């Protein structure tokens, strides 16, 4: 799944989660070794981390020695994505 706008996705998700969840996610990504070495701080640092991770994940996927599929889920239509995955599996398995 690819969410084209990380910030928008987190803004959406954080309305369904507790403040404790957000505080922990921010701490986890900014206050450990990687976040400290990169100078990541607070909510903005968390977003920067996620954006960088997305870039790395997409680069890794491109280098995989097998076919892969990246699905854009910017409309948050999870039911449609489930059907898409099923269709891909039926076609390629």
Image (cartoon, rainbow, N blue to C red):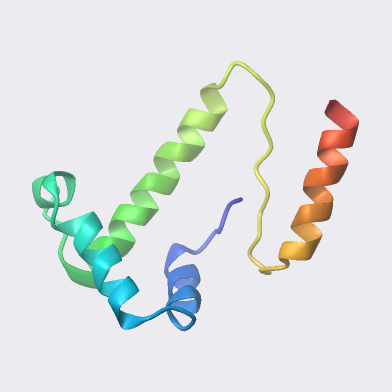
Name the residue at the top extreme: 65
Tell me what residue is drawn at x 48 percent, y 74 percent.
13
Tell me what residue is drawn at x 60 percent, y 16 percent.
65
State the quadrant of the C terminus.
Answer: top right
Q: Quadrant of residue 77?
A: bottom right
Instruction: Note whether 44 is above or below 85 in the view shown.
Output: below
Tell me what residue is drawn at x 19 percent, y 69 percent.
42
Q: Quadrant of residue 88?
A: top right
Q: Position of residue 46 (x, y in %)?
A: 28, 62
Left or right, residue 88 beside residue 44: right
Q: Position of residue 62 (x, y in %)?
A: 55, 28
Q: Nearer the viewer, residue 90 or 60?
A: 90
Left or right, residue 65 beside residue 51: right
Instruction: Note whether 62 is above or below 10 in the view shown.
Output: above
Left or right, residue 48 beside residue 60: left
Tell me what residue is drawn at x 11 percent, y 54 percent.
39
């Amino acid at each position: 799944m690819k969410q084209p706008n990380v910030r928008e996705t987190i803004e959406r998700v954080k309305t369904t989660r507790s403040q404790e969840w957000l505080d922990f996610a921010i701490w986890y990504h900014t206050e450990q070794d990687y976040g400290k070495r990169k100078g990541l701080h607070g909510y903005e640092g968390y977003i920067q981390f996620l954006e960088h991770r997305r870039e790395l994940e997409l680069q890794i996927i491109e280098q995989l020695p097998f076919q892969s599929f990246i699905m854009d889920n910017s409309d948050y239509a999870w039911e449609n994505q489930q059907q898409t995955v099923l269709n891909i599996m039926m076609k390629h398995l």
